[in-house]
Image (spheres, rainbow, N blue to C red):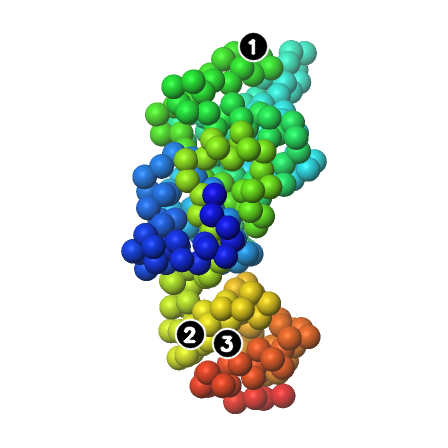
Amino acid sequence: MPEESNRLDLAKWAQVESEWTLAETAVANLARVILHGPPGVGKTHLASRVGPALSITLCEDLSVQEIGGHYLPNGTQWSFHYGPVSTAFKEGLPLLIHEMGRASGAVHDFMLAVLDCPDVARLTLPSGETILPGAGFKVIATSNSSPETLDPALRSRFQAEVHLRTPHPELVRRFELLYPRLGRAFADSFKDPERAIDPRRLLSFVELLQKQVALRRAAALTFVDSAPDVLAAFSAAGVRFPCDRS
Ligand SMILES: Nc1ncnc2c1ncn2[C@@H]1O[C@H](COP(=O)(O)OP(=O)(O)OP(=O)(O)O)[C@@H](O)[C@H]1O
Ligand SMILES: [Mg+2]
């Protein structure tokens, strides 16, 4: 796998506009893809383009039973309830997995079977039933951590991985349309990861401005200690906001 420092050149090398073009190609054409990068750049937004899908967010406390299925009391009987992963697998639906890097060891082991190639993939559930993947089953996983932290066997089951270090161009355009040059200033902030403006905080900042909250107040609430630097960067980029009403 390429070193971190080489990844910036990968989109250029592949002769595409940005890593997002690579991500869109992967999501449109492959059944097991992992997208990783900093918070808020648009990974989930892109993954959601697969249409109606089941979705899970992994964390240390999530059990295999919760995602794969388990027995629940039904009057005097017990009946088996499929979990989101076994449902998507069996019904052939897209499955979005958020925070892929945060699963427990047991869930990672379970995902080895889920992510196998369709010719060998099969899940044996606690009910004893063995299920095969339905025709439309696909997995788009997102993560803030690098797939390098995943178990190598799990990582190799993804057909493609894309490192998305900059915000989706449509998100940049969304800001540019609201306030000219804001999109450019936002995108430029990602040239230095230390100075990168949190996309969700920028959305909140804009929301406050649109509710007539004064500029510095909106910035203090959303960018906290970096508010003076962020406003200075916007000013240097020529962004014009409504008058400060503080
Ligand atoms: N292409 C886009 N066009 C318009 N808005 C977008 C786009 N991508 C993301 N956004 C907006 O940006 C916000 C963050 O996007 P999203 O939830 O996809 O980020 P993420 O990369 O999955 O973050 P995290 O790693 O924290 O889960 C959302 O409010 C979303 O609506
Ligand atoms: Mg997300």
Q: Badge 1: few (under 14), some or many (20 or more) residues near its Cα, within 10 Å?
A: few
In front of the other: label 3 or label 1?
Answer: 1
Q: Badge 3: few (under 14), some or many (20 or more) residues near its Cα, within 10 Å?
A: few
Q: Is residue 152 above or below residue 226?
A: above
Residue 98 position in % (x across, y down): 54, 43
Task: Give SS at disc 1.
Answer: loop
Q: Residue at x 40, y 58 (%)?
A: 9
Task: Give SS at disc 2.
Answer: helix
Which of pointers 3 and 2 lies earlier in the amino acid sequence?
Answer: 2
Q: Nearer the viewer, residue 100 or 193?
A: 193
In front of the other: label 3 or label 2?
Answer: 2
Is residue 92 found left or right of 246 in the rendered image?
A: left
Inspect the image, locate mark 3, and give the three-letter code of the amino acid beneath it.
Gln
Inspect the image, locate mark 1, and give the three-letter code of the amino acid beneath it.
Gly
Q: Is residue 214 above or below residue 160?
A: below
Q: Nearer the viewer, residue 52 or 201?
A: 201
Task: Give SS at disc 3.
Answer: helix
Circles 3 and 2, Cβ within 8 Å, touching? The answer is no
Tell me the quarter of the picture where residue 60 sits: top right
Q: Residue at x 62, y 71 (%)?
A: 222
Circles 1 and 2, Cβ within 8 Å, touching? The answer is no
In front of the other: label 1 or label 2?
Answer: 2
Q: List the residue tagged with mark 3.
A: 210
User: Quarter of the image containing the C terminus?
Assistant: bottom right
Q: Badge 2: few (under 14), some or many (20 or more) residues near its Cα, within 10 Å?
A: some
Label for residue 128?
A: 1
Q: What is the distance, in whole Å, between disc 1 and disc 2 at their CAs?
A: 56 Å
Q: List the residue tagged with mark 2.
A: 184
Label for residue 41?
A: none
Residue 5 position in % (x across, y down): 50, 57
Is residue 60 found left or right of 6 in the rendered image?
A: right
Q: Residue at x 39, y 53 (%)?
A: 10
